[in-house]
Image (spheres, grey):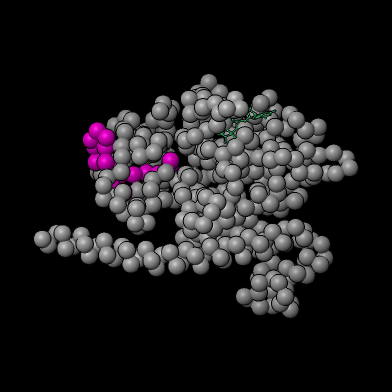
Amino acid sequence: MDVNITWDDVPWLDYRKQISEGITDGEPVGWVVTHERALLQLATADGPVRAELSGRFRHLADLGAAELPAVGDFVAYRPGEPAQIDRVLPRKSAFRRKEAGVRTEAQVLCANADLAIIVTTAPGMDADDPGHELDDFSLRRIERYTATLDPRIRSLVILNKCDLVADPQAVRAYVAAELPGTIVVALSALTGDGVDALEGILEPGNVAVMVGSSGCGKSTLINRLAGAEAKTGHIRYTDGRGRHTTTTRSMYRLPNGGIVVDTPGMREVQVWAEDETGGDPVAQAFPEIAELEDLCKFSDCRHEHEPGCAVKEQLAEGSILPDRYRSYLQLRNAVGLTSEMRRQKARERGRQIAKFSRQLKKDRNR
Ligand SMILES: Nc1nc2c(ncn2[C@@H]2O[C@H](COP(=O)(O)OP(=O)(O)OP(=O)(O)O)[C@@H](O)[C@H]2O)c(=O)[nH]1
Ligand SMILES: [Mg+2]
Ligand SMILES: [Zn+2]
């Protein structure tokens, strides 16, 4: 696991400006730069450190009372070989994903990121059928990505493989019009065309996490951005079809000091409920709808059959796209369902944690 990040690259001061609680002065702190199963690699003021979770932390995590550290997390550790991680310091943001299936828990993919880069293959366009959706491309999938984002993380969409489309700027304009409020960049990771637009967005000290389906070109783009600085090749293997697939999450420092996290491709994005910030990720993914909500007659308007609904009015007038409206309702309802499942799970977990603390107390008094 060779990663080109040293403590000098770590945005610790920036983090401390935003997070002041839950940190003990003098306690050794590391930044998780990569992990392979239970073994984590930290960048620390004392150089690279190999670390694992302490037994107590692992137990709390098993109970669901603590979230496992992810790439980008600051952790407090006890030196050793390997060092022991006792806790994760408060996060300024968390990029989570929920696996397809019935689990109600989401996994943290990257912590403390400033920017999420949603990569997708550019849609094919032809004169008869503008917006014809080719293989990997789906507007609705992009909405699902933005609707699961922590509101504290900015996002942008990359249409990659533009060397394969006739008119990248027309494709970009089409996608931007279909996704109001979304920043869309068209480029080719292979030829490098359009990549400079992205370089201006990745600021020194900022952490960007790259997400998207397998094969959309995330690793190729990171290689392109990193130039001679890093090669993502060492975290790839070739599958039976000769493809290189990323299997771990790792971060790379770019020549300008920006940091990018590569992630394995996701097969499907599941929406789920997460409101630790009190924000509404679904509303955030549909700004043109959210900004009308205050104008509805009823403050709890669901924009379905209520009279005086400003959203339905704009829909009738054509300033809200029908597909966007449908997608918004669908995502909102899906999030409502997972929220209910999560509440049930949380009650169950509360009981288990109470039992664990009683046991700890009993052991101590013995
Ligand atoms: N034509 C073209 N091919 C590209 C471009 N970017 C990536 N590719 C190709 O697409 C394939 C997949 O690229 P990767 O960078 O491995 O994709 P990935 O998103 O990292 O995939 P996972 O690691 O599986 O999630 C490779 O064969 C790349 O050469 C591009 O801009 N244009
Ligand atoms: Mg990859
Ligand atoms: Zn309404």
Tell me where residue 322 appears, x and y as whole percent.
77, 60
Picture coordinates of residue 148, whole percent (x, y): 56, 54
| Quadrant occupied by the N terminus | top left
Q: Residue furthest top?
A: 228
Nearest the viewer among 8 and 301 is 301
Taking the view exactly as shown, the residue that stands out farthest to the left is 366
In the foreground, 253 or 68: 68
Q: Residue at x 26, y 61 (%)?
A: 356
Side (left or right) of 221 relative to 278: right
Examine the rendering and report whether any part of residue 263 can be seen.
Answer: yes
Q: Residue at x 82, y 65 (%)?
A: 317
Q: Residue at x 59, y 49 (%)?
A: 269
Along the viewing direction, whichever of 63 and 141 lies nearer the viewer:
63
Instruction: Please say if 190 is above or below 178.
Output: above
Residue 309 lies, in percent from the top left, at 72, 73
Location of residue 121 (image quadrant): top right
Q: Residue 54: where, in percent of width, then height?
A: 27, 45
Q: Residue at x 40, y 35 (%)?
A: 36
Q: Is residue 102 left or right of residue 133?
A: left
First to last magenta residue range: 71-87
User: Residue placed farthest to the front in the image?
Assistant: 240
Give above or below for 334 relative to 34: below
Magenta stretch containing residue 247, yes or no? no
In the depicted view, which residue is nearer to us: 215 or 13? 215
Looking at the rendered image, the quarter that the C terminus falls into is: bottom left
